[in-house]
Image: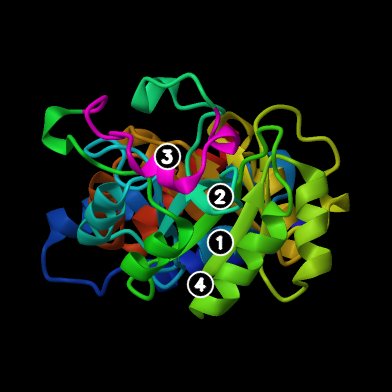
Amino acid sequence: LISFSVSVIYVVQVLHALAPERKQDPLRDSVASGMLMAVGATILTALIVAGFAFAEILDDAGPDRPITVMAHRGSSLKAPENSLSAIRLAMEEGADMVEIDVQETADGVVVLLHDSDLARIAGVRRGIHEMTLAEIRELDAGSWFSEDFAGERIPTLREALELGWPTVGFNVELKYAGHDRELAASVIRILDESGCTECVISSLNQGAVEEVRRLAPDRRVGLIVGQSLGNLMRVDADFFAVRTGLASRDLIYGSRRRGREVIVWTVNDPVDMARMAALGVDGIMTDNPALLRTVMEQRAELSRAERVAFSVRAWLSR
């Protein structure tokens, strides 16, 4: 009872601080008061049901809390994934970071490719690890997407960094397709040589995450999670990239308390983008960075009271 009373007092004080200065307009005042009462009732319900740390909701609703706009394989809704064109477009559309997939060629060059072979994007049923860079350079990796991108080539990691950094950072996902040699070590070396301080490494493979941590303890590394979460806090990672269905308040705030971040993938619906932002994620991965940037700008225009209301609603839904 004492805890509940303190919560009530705290919420009332917070809502009073959030309320706009009183204007000489009875109707406006009545509407504003009603909105604040509704927000207060929602917040108190959340406190009663779960005893949630309200200060964390306020932190999420603050105007200065950044949410990273991450372009999934570049602006891949409008250009071929993992191409220089997709990276260039993502930069133009206001992405903060670009997520790319990397593998090694037969001669040990790190290039951008998601699939285990080239069938989908180049019509060749061979893996990257079976071909040299010179052979790969001869392939058209753009026509599958649109004739407007005919002649697009598979880029190397160095080329991607030269184009994007320092305008955008990169999230480099290590893809292991049976021929990985020293992929982690090669990527770390290339990132170090590029001077990209805003480049992170990620992988679905926990062993790869551990290898990156061992080889480059100062380089940020993340674990990608597509299914069961398990006990993620045992993994020595700086961030977790999870499907939206796995993004919960427990994961987000539990990670935050331990100094980790949560990024969700792959979000292309504006309503889902707003919902994930309200839930408190640190970054959102999307095929459409222009749309996500617009949603983030619209969110920034909301009052803090409105952001609190959206955050509580998102919290209650998870």
Q: Amino acid at mark 1?
A: Val
* Image location (x, y in percent) of residue 226: 65, 31
Q: Earlier in the sequence, mark 1 or mark 2?
A: 1
What is the quadrant of residue 272 in the picture?
top left
Q: Eyeballing the image, is 276 above or below 217?
A: above
Question: Pointer 4: what residue?
Answer: 198
Gap between marks 2 and 3, in whole Å? 36 Å
Q: Amino acid at mark 4?
A: Glu
Q: Earlier in the sequence, mark 4 or mark 2?
A: 4
Residue 260's disc number: none
What is the quadrant of residue 177 in the picture?
top right
- Circle 3 packing at 10 Å, graded few (<14), some (14-19), many (20+), is few
* Image location (x, y in percent) of residue 274: 37, 43
Query: Foreground residue, 251 or 167?
Result: 167
Gap between marks 1 and 4, in whole Å? 38 Å
Element class at badge 3? helix
Q: Is residue 136 magenta?
A: yes
Q: Which region of the structure is painted magenta?
A: 127-145
Question: Pointer 1: what residue?
Answer: 11
In the image, which is nearer the foreground, mark 2 or mark 3? 3
- Circle 1 packing at 10 Å, graded few (<14), some (14-19), many (20+), is many
Question: Pointer 3: what residue?
Answer: 135
Gap between marks 4 and 2, in whole Å? 15 Å
Label 3 near label 4: C-beta < 8 Å? Answer: no
Gap between marks 1 and 2, in whole Å? 29 Å
